[in-house]
Structures are given as structure tokens and as C-alpha cells.
Image (cartoon, rainbow, N blue to C red):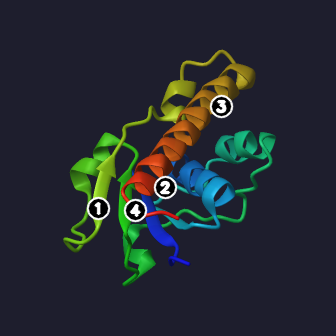
Amino acid sequence: MKPKLKVLFLCTGNSCRSQMAEGLCRHLLGDFIEPYSAGIEKHGLNPLAVKVMGEIGIDISGQRSKTVDELGEKEFDYVVTVCDRAKEMCPFFPARVKVVHREFEDPPKLAEEAAGEAEALALYRRVRDEIRDYILSLSREWRAAGDLF
């Protein structure tokens, strides 16, 4: 059996998108991938992200917001940047690490214009589902490349 791929989901503040990606990846592909998340900065775990993940049976309340530096010398197979700022400010990783990028809208920013919590939650759900679909498409790419399974 192949060792699990070590995948880091990187965002600006490690409060929402990267946290959801880590939780989704662990839930969907935890037998094959060891997911992590971090930020360029840390902004704390977003409570609405926790709520929408809980709606689909994924508890991320035990995860914590952290910076890349807090991960120490951990070696990753892939780094997935989930926002443009993280891509622009992405720290240096060894050449063997494959860095991929996919911009997702920032749910807290989107929710600033929401009429209330129900509308805000709908925006968080949309981004959560986009991240889930992207992780599944990545897993198909990684499997085709021989990196997974």
C-alpha cells in the first residue's frame, strides 16, 4: 500500500476555505490523503464554516487556525492554494512539492452583503460545495498520475 499523500491547503488566514478543504479531504479521502491546512496569517476558525461543515456531517470544530511556520519541517507532496493572495505569497517549498492553485471566493467577504445569517450560510454552503467538487476532481487527477491509490 502506498503511503498517504501529504496535502497542505493554504489560504490567507486559515479561517474558512483552507479549513473546509482540510475537513472535506479528511472525510472524503482520509484513507489515502493526510490533509493539513494553514495560512499566511491566522485569523481564527470561522464559526459559520464550522456550522456549514457540520450540516454535512463533518466536524471541523477541533481544527485550529495556524500559519505555515507552525507546521514545522513537515514535508508535503502537494500544496493547494485556495485563494489568490496565498498563491502570491506562497512560501518556498522544495522542488519535489507540487503546488496547484484554485481560487475560491471568500465566504466571510461574500457574507458582508448578506441580508442575514440564512443568506450568509447559503454563500458558505456554495463555496463549501465548490471546494468539495474540486477536491474530488483533484483526487481523480492524482489517481491518473499514479500519485494516489
The mark that comes first in sequence, 2 or 1, is 2
User: Dot 3: few (<14), some (14–19), or many (≥20) neighbours within 10 Å?
Assistant: many
Q: Mark 2: which amino acid?
A: Asn
Label 2 – label 1 distance at C-alpha: 20 Å
Residue at numbered disc 3: 125
Which kind of residue does numbered mark 3 sit on? Arg
Which mark, residue 138? none
Say whether residue 61 is left or right of residue 110.
Answer: right
The alpha-carbon separation of the residues under discs 3 and 4 comes to: 31 Å
Against 79, residue 53 (above or below) is above
Q: Which residue is mark 2?
A: 14
* Mark closest to the chain's N terminus, 3 or 4: 3
Residue 98 — which label?
1
Residue 97 position in % (x across, y down): 28, 68
| Helix, strand or loop under label 1 | strand
Which SS class for mark 3?
A: helix
